[in-house]
Amino acid sequence: MTNRLFKDSLFKFIFGRNDDESKKRLLSLYNALSGSNHTDINALELTTIENVIYVTWKNDISFLIEDETYLLEQQSSFNPNMPLRGMIYFAELYGKYLAKKDLDLYGEKLIKLPSPRFYVLYNGKTEKPDEMRLRLSDSFAKSAEGFEWSATMLNINEGHSTKILNACESLQDYSKYVKMVREEIESGKSIDEATDRAVDEAIKQNLLDGFFKTHKAEVLSMILTEFDQEQYDRNRRREGYEEGIAIGEKKGIAIGEKRGMQQGVQQTRIETARSMLKDGLPSDLIMKYTGISAQNLAKL
């Protein structure tokens, strides 16, 4: 198994680490988004919360600067529920902010909070406009006038959002690398082979000022060992259901769909575990993400 949404991890590795190199890139990205020209990386305070709410909900980067709190999410597939996820995440951020500043939520004095800025950086294959405003109100079962939360989705694929990409060379180089990997995969290469080729080309083009040469091992390791749990679960359920329907129809019994689905899911787990074994992943990780028992894994 390889990381289906590998760009999430790479994006955070490039822009979200707490070191000068990464913070310079993040500051450049902030300037591009806000139209500012800050040069002091110490003005950035990283506030990223790991594994917030659920272990499968991981934000990419959040940071505080000049009384504004930014949340940046990279997405390789369109997700209309980002405003809801952002609202939940910001609630967690604001809770931590209140605790850090020792502010009384129940007092008579109005509490001043850093203004929220939520950007979804989209680089998926489905064609989308340069900019979209995703609104929480679209999720409401009934109209709730006066209540709103939104996310600004920016298409960072090559040929889109050129003003922002030109203003942030690091984001432009990241977008170029993603395109390289995608083209290699579409030509029939596996993700690990595609990544290896793309990294070599990125080194040749000196993308991100030598980042790929310095961090080649980390980039390759990250793609081979991490994958998105949400996407994996969705695929597993869909594949198991489809295979289950086929088994149920073949048996021609009323409960074939249910039983077949269960058999299909189990077979999918076994095949996934077999693939993960071939890739040399550790047993505890395989059992965690496939749900396969230690006994069945031993048989494989």
Image (cartoon, rainbow, N blue to C red):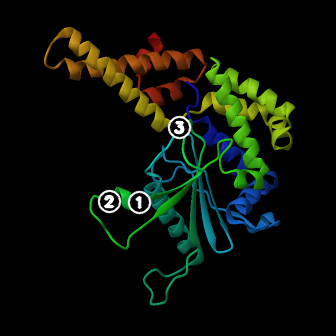
Give the alpha-carbon distance from disc 1 to disc 3, as whole Å. 22 Å
Helix, strand, or loop for circle 2? loop
280 up-or-down from 43: above or below: above
- Check disc 1 and report the residue beneath it: 136
79 up-or-down from 256: above or below: below
- Camera-nearest residue between 38 and 138: 138
| Residue pictured at 31% horizontal, 24% vertical | 241
- Check disc 3 and report the residue beneath it: 126
Q: Position of residue 66 (x, y in %)?
A: 69, 73
Q: Amino acid at mark 3?
A: Thr
Q: Position of residue 43 (x, y in %)?
A: 75, 68
Q: Amino acid at mark 1?
A: Leu
Q: Nearer the N terminus, badge 1 or badge 3?
A: 3
- Check disc 2 and report the residue beneath it: 140
With 127 as the anchor, is 13 left or right in this view? Answer: right
Q: Are marks 2 and 3 in contact (CB under 8 Å)?
A: no
Are there few (<14), some (14-19), or many (20+) residues within 10 Å of tag 3? few
- Camera-nearest residue between 18 and 64: 64
Are there few (<14), some (14-19), or many (20+) residues within 10 Å of tag 2? few
| Residue pictured at 72% horizontal, 50% vertical | 165
240 up-or-down from 176: above or below: above
Q: Are marks 2 and 1 in contact (CB under 8 Å)?
A: yes
174 up-or-down from 140: above or below: above
Helix, strand, or loop for circle 3? loop
Label tally: 3
| Residue pictured at 56% horizontal, 40% vertical | 76
Q: Amino acid at mark 2?
A: Phe
| Residue pictured at 41% horizontal, 33% vertical | 234
